[in-house]
């Protein structure tokens, strides 16, 4: 496939903005840059491995001598470790930006470990979600200063983790009730969708690409959590907790989507309505009805169509994956037990062969349509 800069180059030549000789030199320069960038992944892999081993070694050293240190020495050691990583990142930022980014990310990770270690030193474990809040706050303060994608990832992960932790503490013994579980699952699903769909074009910056990756990774587990049959616990939530929980689970992902997409966030509003209808169908109250499977198939189709509309192939792939999983789950729960063993196995094989081929063919056509090619 032609690179994005090559398409622009053709337009500039046709418009008479540059001549053929300039176009040849630009092409040679960009081709060399692409070759150099294509081999950057070993450097990032080495930096990631180095950061992990340094952090692990630091933790092992601290844990080996932890009991022999006084509380003030422990506090000073934790603070010095966090500061050392960030100072090293600042020193390396100009000469080796990738190293600086890695060290700053390690420092933010060490901040979380330091917060919980300090809580252990001074017995400040009465409200443990406050540790996540302070960790998320530290990452949020570092984000505008560093403007690096790892800080974006820390903020995007730690903030919802803190809110879910607060919700678990607020629900207390009622945490395992269906309502308490379902509220957190729906909130996680809508937030993952907001992250996944934050990009509206093929060319996006590092921060939006990071959010899209986080959303794609979290989307399938969040969808499974929404659809699981969870019927443990009998304590109902109070009306006040229900209102607060559902307001946060629905409102916060919508605010994130509006902040990332602006007026183009109307599909996220439709996704919110979709999840509310799914909750009304009571997918984990006894046997799952056919309406639930039909609703999941409709949502998967809408996600794939959204990907085609905004030329994002990852949404098409996830939509096709959810659609195929819905068909397979429907077969296991509503069809297979009504057939004889041999017939059910043959039907399962045909479903994998014919259904897999059909779905993959449809997926390829949708991806080609999203990229502007012929079906």
Image: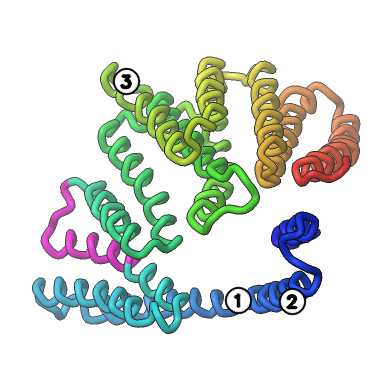
Give the overall secondary structure of the magenta segment.
helix
Please tell me which residue is depicted at 33% across the width and 21% down the height of the picture.
242
Task: Tell me the distance, in whole angstroms, between the alpha carbons under discs 2 and 3.
Answer: 62 Å
Task: Tell me the quarter of the image containing the C terminus.
Answer: top right
Element carrying mark 1: loop
Residue where numbered disc 3 is placed: 243
The local crowd at label 1, few if under 14, some if 14 to 19, many if 20 or more residues have their Cα within 10 Å, is: few
The local crowd at label 3, few if under 14, some if 14 to 19, many if 20 or more residues have their Cα within 10 Å, is: few
Q: Nearer the viewer, residue 145 or 7?
A: 7
Earlier-in-chain disc, 2 versus 3? 2
Q: Which residues are magenta?
A: 108-126
Please tell me which residue is depicted at 71% across the width and 32% down the height of the picture.
305
The mark closer to the camera, 2 or 3, is 2
Residue 339, placed above or below residue 144: above
Quadrant of the image occupied by residue 4: bottom right
Residue 40's label in the rendered image is 1
User: Per the image, is 124 magenta?
Assistant: yes
User: Per the image, is 227 magenta?
Assistant: no
Residue 25's label in the rendered image is 2
Q: Position of residue 359 (x, y in %)?
A: 82, 38
Horizontal relation, residue 291 to residue 221: left or right: right
- Of all residues shown, which one is farthest toward the front? 16
């Amino acid at each position: 496939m032609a690179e994005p800069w090559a398409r622009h180059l053709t337009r500039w030549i046709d418009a008479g903005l540059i001549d053929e000789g300039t176009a040849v030199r630009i092409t040679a320069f960009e081709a060399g840059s692409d070759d150099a960038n294509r081999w950057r992944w070993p450097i990032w892999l080495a930096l990631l491995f180095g950061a992990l081993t340094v952090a692990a070694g630091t933790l092992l050293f601290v844990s080996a001598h932890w009991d022999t240190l006084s509380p003030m020495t422990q506090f000073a050691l934790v603070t010095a470790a966090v500061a050392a990583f960030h100072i090293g990142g600042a020193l390396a930022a100009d000469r080796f930006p990738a190293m600086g980014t890695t060290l700053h990310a390690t420092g933010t990770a060490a901040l979380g470990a330091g917060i919980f270690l300090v809580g252990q030193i001074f017995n400040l474990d009465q409200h443990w979600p406050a540790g996540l809040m302070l960790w998320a706050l530290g990452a949020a303060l570092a984000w505008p200063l560093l403007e690096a994608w790892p800080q974006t990832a820390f903020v995007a992960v730690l903030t919802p983790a803190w809110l879910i932790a607060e919700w678990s503490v607020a629900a207390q013994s009622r945490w395992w009730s269906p309502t308490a579980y379902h509220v957190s699952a729906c909130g996680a699903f809508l937030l993952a969708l907001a992250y996944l769909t934050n990009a509206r074009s093929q060319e996006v910056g590092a921060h939006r690409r990071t959010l899209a990756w986080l959303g794609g990774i979290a989307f399938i587990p969040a969808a499974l959590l929404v659809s699981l049959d969870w019927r443990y616990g009998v304590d109902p939530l109070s009306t006040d907790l229900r209102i607060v929980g559902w307001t946060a689970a629905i409102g916060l992902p919508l605010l994130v989507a509006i902040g990332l997409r602006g007026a183009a966030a109307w599909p996220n509003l439709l996704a919110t309505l979709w999840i509310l209808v799914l909750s009304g169908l009571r997918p984990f109250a006894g046997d799952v009805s056919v309406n639930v499977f039909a609703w999941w198939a409709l949502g998967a189709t809408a996600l794939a169509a959204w990907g085609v509309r905004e030329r994002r192939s990852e949404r098409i792939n996830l939509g096709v994956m959810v659609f195929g999983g819905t068909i397979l789950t429907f077969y296991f729960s509503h069809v297979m037990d009504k057939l004889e063993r041999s017939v059910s196995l043959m039907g399962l094989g045909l479903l994998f062969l014919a259904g897999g081929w059909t779905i993959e063919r449809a997926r390829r056509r949708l991806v080609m349509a999203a990229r502007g090619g012929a079906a």
